[in-house]
């Protein structure tokens, strides 16, 4: 291959910080900081008890170490567990009351926080460091009976729903990071779609880590009641800092009979610089339960950021005829590491799952797909189809495919395929002959490689994601 | 006697002809085994086959075997001409190379000095390192191609009951030479025992080695074999594995492609029945450029059988132009059968073609239906299809007489007659 | 337009072209014929700037030495190659690809980028001229296209990108008679004073439609005979062996 002129890694576009006064919990992980969080959020006692129970369990849990990316030990006592823009400590009633600096920040991020008169309105809940700062389109949603608010608000306003579903998909003591989150989660979004309601717009949350030395622990809970539908989007960015920051979110989805949840993520946390200094540790637990008959949960993720990504959005297919899907693009460049995949647990009859994973590794990065497909004895006539493809750019990076496949049912079928290769030289040549330079050609071919996943994203996101794919690989061809 | 499957260090004293260094090595290994015990599903390599659980369910006690009786009424395969060696309970009893140039072949029993004192984390290898003192050592000198196949009769006698056997074998094929073997296991014991084998295969430049692994019938044996192959440039390793009829069988195969243009092929056709539990685990390490590897594992699972395939392809950063492919297909034909797989790729070089596929499910309904419209019963149709499914692997055996021989064994398993 | 002087080329230590000379003036159409394996596609690849060949001799395009100019810049300068075997690129939408390609070339020429609406209009018009079903243009690039559809798609790209030097590598092979005619019409309607064509073909029939100014015979990496259109007829009768 010839050498075209190579850009050095383009600067991370979202790497600015915002100068805003913060209210912080005392440093360190202890009962006091948990009580502080709970108090700041004016939580009822049951919520504090729940947190403390998780905290007690945490003492007996160990950080997992089976995943491929290794990271230096995190000193949990050296982190702030709560950081909130001062102006938001009394949550604004309308957008006019939101700190203009925050609005400015979100503008820079390209988030349509202002209720713009757009045809395709997107309702946004924005989480800045630890607290939810604004939710848009609230009234319109309320008319349909849809609840879309911060989880803190839901704890106060809709305790019966929160009590019933919180921790019902990710148990309190699931594993170290999930339990840590249960103890110290600060904010996140809550969605409830009532029976037979199709949510008329995309619901969206933007997460932003701003303050330094702060861990971000959001908690998201989405419940789609019988026969309802919702599509939910999540975007994330963070400033450039040369320390590593921890992000350990929990996301729980519950789909009842005939309900469908579509959950899309474009994750673009700061990945660290080209020498691997700084960046976010993105250790996230995402799990959905297809609890009802004919329910469906579909995860789509585009993972381009973070120093280390470690997440497995999963589906528990309990209801008969339920469907789980996982579409993923994970791009790692420079020193990034990603260990991601899914678990499809088939319990009900006629359950179906589909996994499409595209991993792209460049620079010195490491990219692992790790997945489990488990067809239980009672999951008669179930099906899984898995396709995992990896692209390697250069021989300093790695691609790893680790699927676990269990089939305990003779009426069920599991199919798995995986490939690893590099970009085809002939395809590059063809594009060059039509006038495209090396980087344009790579971006085009890689986007083609990812097509099946990209087309799962809602329109506005898909365009952004496509650009991100190109940018993430800049400087990796030569 | 082994308390809680822990083995007394005294067992090592029973092994004669060992020097102090050797003894220390064996003690170290035994202590490691005693500490770890039989592996459980907590260990990544044993995720789908919890040996400790299988053992505690099926064995009350287990002793070290020390009996190597003389052969009685042992009969050679009649279907084709062959050389042979005879092993009883792992010990080399005799050999016959009547079709070959005897100067070109060296065969001896187990020899300590043939093996490096390597450290292992695998408890079963450690157990073997600690206690093995039987096995064989076969060397094919350079520039020699075997005229006829070599059958390795691996006979286990009637009296084996609640015993552990540990053997170590080594096969060396020198430059420009060729060897073709059939490892034929005959199991006369009606009782439970555990056979734990370590095998080391070295192929030098431009050598070829082909092995077929097959059993005479069903038995109560529990087998584990670790095979380590080291393949130099332009040489080719190929292995066919057929159903064992054993209660438990795990073949753990690690092939290191160390020389350019080397090639490794592993193919398997398994019909598992009753409570059979068979696992094949392969790791193919592509360490240099321009090598090929191919694995194709086909399993049919009946009754309560469980089949497992764990296959890993590793490609080192310098191993450009690697071509590696792996395929596992399983048919589950009974409600209580299970098939688990973990096809894994770990790749650090970019100019490679690596892929794997894994499927499991039932016999294709459309095909069954088609055959039934031609007058076959459902059972006949299914049998015909699974037979065809497995025969694809057998059809790749070159020699017609050997192919027929293997086919007969397989049909016996599928049809029961 | 193009001048090739004593071009020698080898790949993987195999000599393919052994001193080839050719001059094409603006507005001319040259045809190259020659037995399989004589080096026709190699010549086309080298003109487009494909890597991997060891080359000596000179290539001049519009007076500029092409050496050291990478593939995409040659394309931007107006060299277009219709491939003998057009490649499939999964996941990449054909229209999208064409638009990206057109815009990079326009940008390189200092022209304004074309907007989506104008582009779609252009494609529609050209596709219709070539009898291409528009539906295939919203499919993945060449994936699952029939042999003929791929070839037509190459000509469509030629029409849209509007190059100065067009190299057609066996664009007529595998086409039905109607398609052959459409493609020839496509070429003929693009002929102009400032455009030159190099048509590689095995069949004299194409040359009935596209009337070349010159016909060359390439054999063992050299042009062994050049002549007018009659040479093609002679070849059709006698075969390559009797030429010389
Ligand atoms: N990468 C390569 N390595 C080795 N030989 C090559 C390579 N590419 C081309 N060749 C050889 O060079 C010769 C010329 O090939 P080329 O494709 O230019 O022929 P052609 O004239 O276009 O033939 P056809 O009429 O069949 O299309 C052939 O013998 C071919 O096998
Ligand atoms: Mg050609």
Image: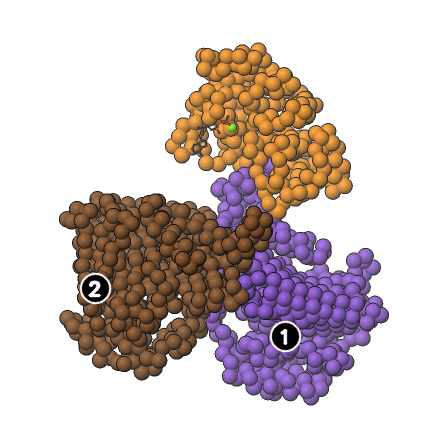
In brown, which chain?
A: B
Residue A200 seen from this side: yes
Q: How is the image coloured?
A: by chain
**Quadrant where the C terminus of chain C is found in the figure:** top left
Give the residue at x 28% y 77%: B63
Secondary structure beneath dot 1 equals loop
Q: Which residue is mark 1?
A: A169
Dots 1 and 2: beta carbons under 8 Å?
A: no
Using residue B187 as the reference point, say whether residue C236 is left or right of it.
right
The x and y percentages for residue A235 are: 66, 63
Q: CA distance from mark 1 to mark 2?
A: 64 Å
Chain C drawn in what color? orange
Between A416 and B385, the one nearer to me in the picture? B385
Q: Is residue A216 above or below residue A426?
A: below
The x and y percentages for residue B258 are: 32, 52
Chain A drawn in what color? purple
Image quadrant where residue C130 sits: top right
Q: Which residue is mark 2?
A: B72
Secondary structure beneath dot 2 equals loop
**Category of crowding for the residue at label 1, using alpha-carbon neighbours closer than 10 angstroms: few (below 14), some (14–19), many (at least 20):** many
């Amino acid at each position: 291959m010839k050498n075209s002129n190579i850009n050095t890694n383009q600067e991370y576009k979202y790497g600015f910080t915002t100068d805003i006064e913060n209210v912080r919990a005392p440093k360190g992980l202890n009962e006091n900081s948990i009580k502080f969080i709970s108090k700041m959020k004016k939580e009822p006692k049951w919520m504090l008890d729940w947190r403390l129970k998780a905290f007690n369990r945490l003492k007996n849990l160990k950080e997992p170490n089976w995943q491929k990316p290794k990271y230096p030990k995190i000193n949990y006592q050296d982190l702030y567990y709560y950081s909130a823009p001062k102006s938001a400590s009394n949550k604004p009633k309308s957008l006019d009351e939101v700190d203009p600096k925050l609005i400015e920040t979100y503008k820079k991020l390209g988030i349509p926080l202002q209720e713009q008169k757009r045809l395709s309105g997107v309702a946004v809940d924005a989480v800045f460091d630890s607290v939810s700062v604004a939710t848009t389109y609230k009234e319109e949603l309320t008319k349909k009976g849809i609840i879309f608010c911060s989880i803190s608000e839901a704890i106060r306003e809709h305790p019966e729903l929160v009590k019933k579903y919180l921790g019902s998909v990710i148990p309190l003591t699931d594993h170290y990071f999930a339990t840590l989150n249960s103890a110290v989660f600060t904010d996140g979004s809550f969605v409830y779609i009532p029976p037979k309601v199709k949510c008329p717009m995309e619901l969206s949350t933007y997460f932003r880590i701003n303050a330094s030395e702060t861990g971000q622990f959001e908690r998201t809970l989405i419940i789609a009641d019988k026969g309802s539908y919702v599509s939910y989007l999540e975007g994330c960015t963070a400033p450039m800092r040369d320390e590593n920051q921890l992000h350990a979110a929990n996301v729980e989805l519950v789909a009842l009979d005939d309900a469908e949840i579509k959950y899309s993520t474009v994750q673009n946390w700061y990945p660290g610089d080209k020498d691997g200094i700084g960046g976010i540790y993105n250790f996230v637990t995402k799990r959905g339960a297809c609890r009802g008959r004919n329910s469906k949960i579909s995860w789509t993720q585009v993972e381009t950021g973070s120093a280390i990504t470690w997440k497995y959005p999963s589906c528990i297919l309990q209801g008969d005829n339920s469907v789980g899907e996982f579409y993923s693009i994970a791009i790692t460049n420079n020193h990034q590491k990603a260990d991601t995949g899914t678990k499809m647990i088939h319990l009900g009859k006629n359950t179906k799952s589909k996994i499409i994973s595209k991993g792209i590794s460049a620079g010195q990065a490491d990219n692992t797909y790790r997945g489990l497909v488990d067809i239980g004895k009672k999951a008669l006539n179930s099906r899984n189809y898995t396709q995992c493809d990896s692209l390697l750019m250069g021989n300093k990076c790695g691609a790893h495919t680790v699927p676990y496949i269990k089939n305990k049912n003779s009426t069920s079928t599991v199919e798995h395929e995986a490939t690893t290769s590099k970009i085809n030289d002939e395809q590059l040549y063809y594009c060059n002959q039509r006038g495209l330079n090396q980087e344009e050609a790579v971006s085009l071919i890689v986007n083609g490689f990812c097509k099946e996943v990209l087309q799962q994203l809602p329109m506005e996101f898909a365009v952004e994601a496509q650009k991100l794919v190109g940018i993430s690989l800049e400087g990796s061809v030569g | 006697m082994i308390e809680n499957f822990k083995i007394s260090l005294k067992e090592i004293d029973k092994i004669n002809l060992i020097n102090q260094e050797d003894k220390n090595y064996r003690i170290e290994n035994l202590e490691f085994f005693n500490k770890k015990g039989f592996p459980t599903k907590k260990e990544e390599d044993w995720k789908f086959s919890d040996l400790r659980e299988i053992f505690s369910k099926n064995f009350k006690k287990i002793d070290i075997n020390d009996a190597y009786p003389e052969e009685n009424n042992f009969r050679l395969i009649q279907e084709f001409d062959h050389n042979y060696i005879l092993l009883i309970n792992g010990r080399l009893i005799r050999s016959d190379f009547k079709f070959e140039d005897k100067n070109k072949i060296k065969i001896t029993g187990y020899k300590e000095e043939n093996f490096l004192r390597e450290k292992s984390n695998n408890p079963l290898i450690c157990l073997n390192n600690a206690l093995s003192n039987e096995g064989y050592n076969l060397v094919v000198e350079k520039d020699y191609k075997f005229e006829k196949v070599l059958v390795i009769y691996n006979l286990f006698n009637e009296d084996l009951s609640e015993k552990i056997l540990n053997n170590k074998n080594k096969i060396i094929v020198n430059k420009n030479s060729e060897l073709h073997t059939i490892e034929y296991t005959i199991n006369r014991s009606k009782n439970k025992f555990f056979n734990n084998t370590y095998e080391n295969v070295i192929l030098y430049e431009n050598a070829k080695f082909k092995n077929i692994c097959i059993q005479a019938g069903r038995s109560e044996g529990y087998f584990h074999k670790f095979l380590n192959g080291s393949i130099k440039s332009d040489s080719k390793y190929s292995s066919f594995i057929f159903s064992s009829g054993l209660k438990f069988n795990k073949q753990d195969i690690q092939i290191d492609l160390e020389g350019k243009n080397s090639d490794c092929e592993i193919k398997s056709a398994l019909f598992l029945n009753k409570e059979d539990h068979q696992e094949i685990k392969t790791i193919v390490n592509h360490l240099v450029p321009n090598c090929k590897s191919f694995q194709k594992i086909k399993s049919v699972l009946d009754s309560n059988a469980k089949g497992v395939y764990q296959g890993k392809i590793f490609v080192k950063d310098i191993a450009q132009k690697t071509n590696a492919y792996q395929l596992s297909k399983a048919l589950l034909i009974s409600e209580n059968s299970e098939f688990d797989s973990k096809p894994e790729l770990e790749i650090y070089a970019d100019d490679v073609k690596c892929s794997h596929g894994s499927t499991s499910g039932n016999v294709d309904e459309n095909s069954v239906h088609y055959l039934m419209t031609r007058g076959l019963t459902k059972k006949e149709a299914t049998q015909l299809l699974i037979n065809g499914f497995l025969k694809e692997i057998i059809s790749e055996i070159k020699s017609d007489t050997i192919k027929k021989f293997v086919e007969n064994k397989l049909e016996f398993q599928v049809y029961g007659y | 337009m193009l001048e090739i002087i004593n071009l020698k080329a080898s790949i993987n230590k195999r000599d393919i072209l052994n001193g080839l000379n050719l001059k094409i003036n603006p507005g001319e159409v040259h045809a190259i014929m020659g037995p399989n394996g004589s080096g026709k596609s190699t010549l086309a690849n080298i003109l487009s700037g494909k890597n991997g060949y060891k080359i000596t001799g000179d290539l001049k395009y519009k007076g500029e030495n092409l050496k050291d100019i990478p593939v995409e810049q040659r394309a931007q300068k107006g060299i277009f190659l219709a491939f003998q075997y057009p490649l499939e690129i999964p996941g990449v939408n054909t229209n999208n690809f064409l638009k990206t390609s057109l815009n990079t070339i326009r940008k390189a020429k200092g022209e304004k980028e074309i907007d989506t609406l104008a582009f779609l209009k252009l494609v529609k018009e050209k596709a219709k001229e070539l009898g291409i079903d528009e539906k295939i243009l919203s499919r993945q690039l060449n994936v699952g296209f029939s042999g003929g559809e791929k070839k037509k798609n190459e000509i469509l790209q030629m029409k849209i990108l509007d190059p100065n030097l067009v190299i057609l590598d066996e664009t007529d092979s595998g086409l039905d008679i109607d398609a052959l005619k459409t493609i020839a019409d496509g070429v003929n309607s693009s002929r102009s004073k400032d455009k030159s064509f190099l048509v590689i073909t095995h069949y004299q029939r194409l040359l009935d439609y596209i009337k070349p100014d010159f016909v060359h015979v390439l054999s063992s990496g050299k042009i062994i005979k050049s002549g007018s259109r009659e040479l093609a007829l002679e070849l059709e009768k006698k075969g390559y062996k009797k030429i010389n």
